[in-house]
Image (cartoon, rainbow, N blue to C red):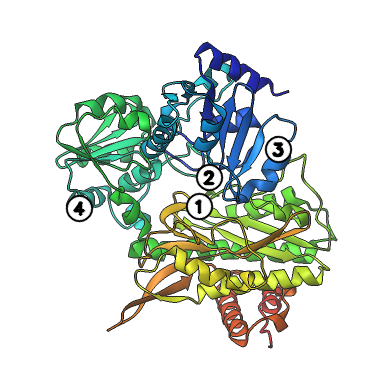
Amino acid sequence: MNKKLDALRQEMKKENIQAYIVPTSDDHDTEYVCSHFMSRSYLSGFTGSAGTLVVGLDQAALWTDGRYFIQAKDQLAGSGIDLMKMGVEGTPSISAYIVDHLSSGSVVGFDGRLFSEAMVEIYEEAFDKKDLILKTDLDLVDRIWKDRPVLPHTSTFHFEKQYAGKTMGEKIAAVRDILSADHLMITKVDQVAWLFNLRAHDIPSFPVAMAYAIVSQDKASIYIDDSRLDATSRELFAKNHVTIRPYDEIYIDVQTLTGTVSVDPYTINSTLYRFIEADIEEEENPIELMKACKNEVEIEQTKHAHLKDAIAMTQFMYWLKTNVGKIPMSEMSAAQKLHDLRASQADFIEDSFATIAAYKEHGAIVHYQSSPETDVPLQPEGLFMVDSGGHYYQGTTDITRTFVLGEITEYERKCFTWALQCHIRLEQATWLYGCTGEQLDMIARQPLWKHSLDFKHGTGHGVGHVLSVHEGPNVIRWQQAYTPFEAGMITSDEPGIYIEGQFGIRHENEVLAVNLDKNAYGQFMGFEPLTWVPFDVDGLDVDEMQPAEVAWLNAYHAKVYEKVSPYLNEQQRQWLAHACRPLIR
């Protein structure tokens, strides 16, 4: 019996609500939320980063994507909540499920601050067909969550130009140069952080402050408690004529705007959107693309960050491969060891996300998180997948390596090889400007598709510059990846194979989109690797690989040794030379 759902249903009855929707979000459409906004996790017990819970008076269901099917199935067991597998044939949409379960005139409730305007409009259109009523001003979870964590209030710090490449003033001027409306609403926390070179620690592994901003043609405002601001940021706000307003005053100030307001309906929360009385121009926030196309300083700095990360990762790989079976180690202790090695690097800030350290069958849970209840010892056998990353002042890293700890099966070896072939195909890809992540994704998946295998996540995501490890608009997946790649975009390359109950394999580098030749056919583009860490060749079946793939891997490993070996001790260098040994096909 889920007592939390029972308590929520009591509140629903008080408000005459027949269905209540709880997403994984905050007032800023943030992917990874702070503890205050973990309402869906609080109610359901499902701790994955993506999912939407619908609670009816007699039933409940949770929607999540393929990264979390196994985890959600385990965590929802016995909760009275049905698992809805998004993207799987036969799974209804959230709106279709609600329409099917409610009678005409029923009321659907949610907190409109947690939904984008675009999402609410989709619900309205679907619910109108059955005369369902929407009530969007209720945070019912807050009524029953007695020990709910408070909103974060960490101190800010200024992100210097030597790392950002441009000053706050330069960025504000660049935004105004392309702003056609009188005002630009900025509600995404990473966009605010990028614009003002402002960082904080409000969200774990996401160094930003909870804040809003409005940029007008002749003025700008940031909405944040000024007691949190560091002296440098406060001084620069004054210098650049940026007014500091209390966080919640955004809902008052938007009502006073006149003229035209540029708003992204896919990111602004619906409650805030509907407070705007001025003429609205709906468009993607221009900061999203500006932020994604890294400038020369950001690119140079992130290369330094990736070298630091490569040193830490290589030291970890050496420690793991030479000590497994000789000293006690587990998923959690290995993750801690990796964190400590990163933290020993200069200018380390924090991990860029919670490390995924998944041994054997745990690897099949795409975003597995080891805990004291699930932690297992590592033995000199099987596969160990580690997906991790760090924030340094110079940049953000994200890397996955699958380590061979001892004997593996022939099928594991073939899967290990096929997944690496996918990775290599994408890193080697060249294309004409205008291609999106949909075309590139199909290039990457071919080695798996020809074996009737696939993976239920994107092949790549954008990576922020000391911001979110996941950012748009660049993404590589075979559905709904519409933005053409631009030079300066940083993206992950991370195909994988996951066999439930057996193992998981993923190979991930970060890559930089670069311009290649330009001729009568147009601008050709490709990827430049940023990550320099050995792939574990102990897992490969070289006979499965093409000569060109082997040549690419050998050349990559030669560069790994060249870049990383000067920072290792003699034993580590000897080990790295063997780990990067040329393969023969």
Query: Residue 163 appears at what percent x and percent y?
Result: 38, 56
Which quadrant of the view contains residue 300?
Answer: bottom left
Q: Nearer the viewer, mark 4 or mark 1?
A: 4
Distance CA(mark 2)–CA(mark 4): 32 Å
Asked if one can make out residue 165 in the rendered structure from this viewpoint, the answer is yes
Q: Looking at the image, which residue is at 77% across and 43% down? A: 374
Whichever of labels 1 and 3 marks the residue nearer the N terminus, that label is 3
Return the residue at label 4.
178
Q: Nearer the viewer, mark 2 or mark 4?
A: 4
Return the residue at label 2.
205
Return the residue at label 1.
391
Which quadrant of the view contains residue 409?
Answer: bottom right
Q: Is residue 220 above or below residue 506?
A: above
Q: Amino acid at mark 1?
A: His
Distance CA(mark 4)–CA(mark 1): 30 Å
Q: Looking at the image, which residue is at 65% across and 53% down? A: 366
Query: Are the residues at dot 2 and dot 4 in contact (C-beta closer than 8 Å)?
Result: no
Q: Is residue 253 above or below residue 94?
A: above
Label 3 sits on a secondary structure element that is helix
Query: Are the residues at dot 1 and dot 2 in contact (C-beta closer than 8 Å)?
Result: yes
Query: Residue 495 appears at what percent x and percent y?
Result: 59, 64
Whichever of labels 4 and 1 marks the residue nearer the N terminus, that label is 4
Distance CA(mark 1)–CA(mark 3): 30 Å
- The quarter of the rendered structure image containing the N terminus is top right
The disc label shown at residue 75, or none: 3
Distance CA(mark 3)–CA(mark 4): 47 Å
Distance CA(mark 1)–CA(mark 2): 8 Å
Distance CA(mark 3)–CA(mark 2): 24 Å
